[in-house]
Amino acid sequence: MSHVMNTYARQPVAFVRGQGVWLWDEDGRKYLDALAGIAVNTLGHNHPRLTRALGEQIGRAIHTSNLFRQPLQEAAADRIAAITGLDEVFFCNSGLEANEAAIKVARKYGHDRGVNEPAIIVMEKAFHGRSLATLSASGSRKVQAGFEPLVQGFVRAPLNDLEAVRQIAAHNKNVVAVFVEPIQGEGGINLARLEYLRGLKEICDRHEWLFMSDEVQCGLGRTGKWFVYQHAGFQPDVLPLAKGLGSGVPVGACVVG
C-alpha cells in the first residue's frame, strides 16, 4: 500500500520514461501523451536543451534563496517583461501561488486606496487553484466542498456578461479588481469574447480597478500570440503565469505593470 496521500483518483499505470510526445510504462507499453502533465509539458519529455540547462544549473547550485541576487532569475524576469509588456515579476512555484499573489496584489492595492475590505470580481465556473483563497475565488463547488468557511471578498459574475459587472460596480464600492481567465479550462473550455474582455478593461479603467488576467493555462503561445490579452489589444495590470512557463519544472510568476 502506498503512503502517498490519496488526493487524486490515480490510474493504475506508472510511467517510467518519456521522449517528446511519447511515454512508456513499467511494462514497456507506449502511450501518446495528450495530457502533457495537465497542460504543463510544452516542450514534451526529455527535451535536450531543457534537460541540459537543468543539469548544468543543478551542478552549480540548486538554491540560494531570494536574499541574494540571482543573475539567471533576473534574465528570466527581463524576458518575461519583454514578452508581456509589463514591468515586474514575482517568481513562485505554481499557478496557484501566482494567483494567490495576484489576490494579494489586489487587496494591497485596495488598502492603499483606503478600501478596508477590498473585493474582487471573479467569474462563475472559474478555476484559480486549490489553496483556501484561490478555491474561494474559483466558481466551482466541486473544489470548495468540504473546505468551508471560504475566504471572503469575492463577488461572482457570469462570464461574458458586462451588464452583470456594471451592476456590481453600481452597488459595491469595495471592488478593486476583476480576475478573469480569458479561456476557462477547468470550467469547460469557455472562451471570453474579445469584445467582452475589452469592455471589462474599459470598466476597470473607469473605476480604477485592476484588470487581472489569469493565463496560467491559456498563456505562453497557446492561442497564436504569447497571451490572450494581446488578441484583445490591451495590457492587463496583473498577469499570473505557470504551467508552460517551466515545461514540467515547478515555476510560476505573477507579473505586474
Image (cartoon, rainbow, N blue to C red):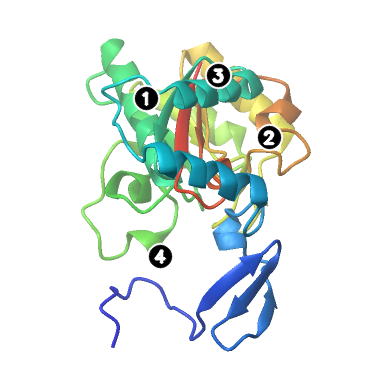
Judged from the image, the secondary structure of the residue bearing numbered disc 2 is: helix
| Amino acid marked by disc 4 | Lys
- Judged by depth in the image, the label closer to the viewer, 2 or 4, is 2
> Which tag, 3 or 2, sits closer to the chain's start?
3
The answer to whether 108 is drawn above or below residue 190 in the figure is above
Q: Quick one: SS at disc 3?
A: helix
Question: Which residue is at the front of the view, 84 or 231?
Answer: 84
Mark earlier in primary sequence (3, 1): 3
Residue identifier under label 1: 106
Q: Distance between the residues labelled 1 and 4?
A: 25 Å
Sequence-first disc among 1 and 2 = 1
Disc with the residue nearer the chain's start (1 vs 4): 1
In this view, the mark in front (1 or 2): 2
Residue at which label 4 appears: 142
Q: What residue is pinned by disc 3?
A: 78
Q: Distance between the residues labelled 2 and 4?
A: 27 Å
Image coords of residue 247 (percent x, y): 57, 49
In this view, the mark in front (3 or 1): 3
Q: How far apart are marks 1 and 2 (CA)?
A: 21 Å
Residue 184's x, y, as percent?
59, 49
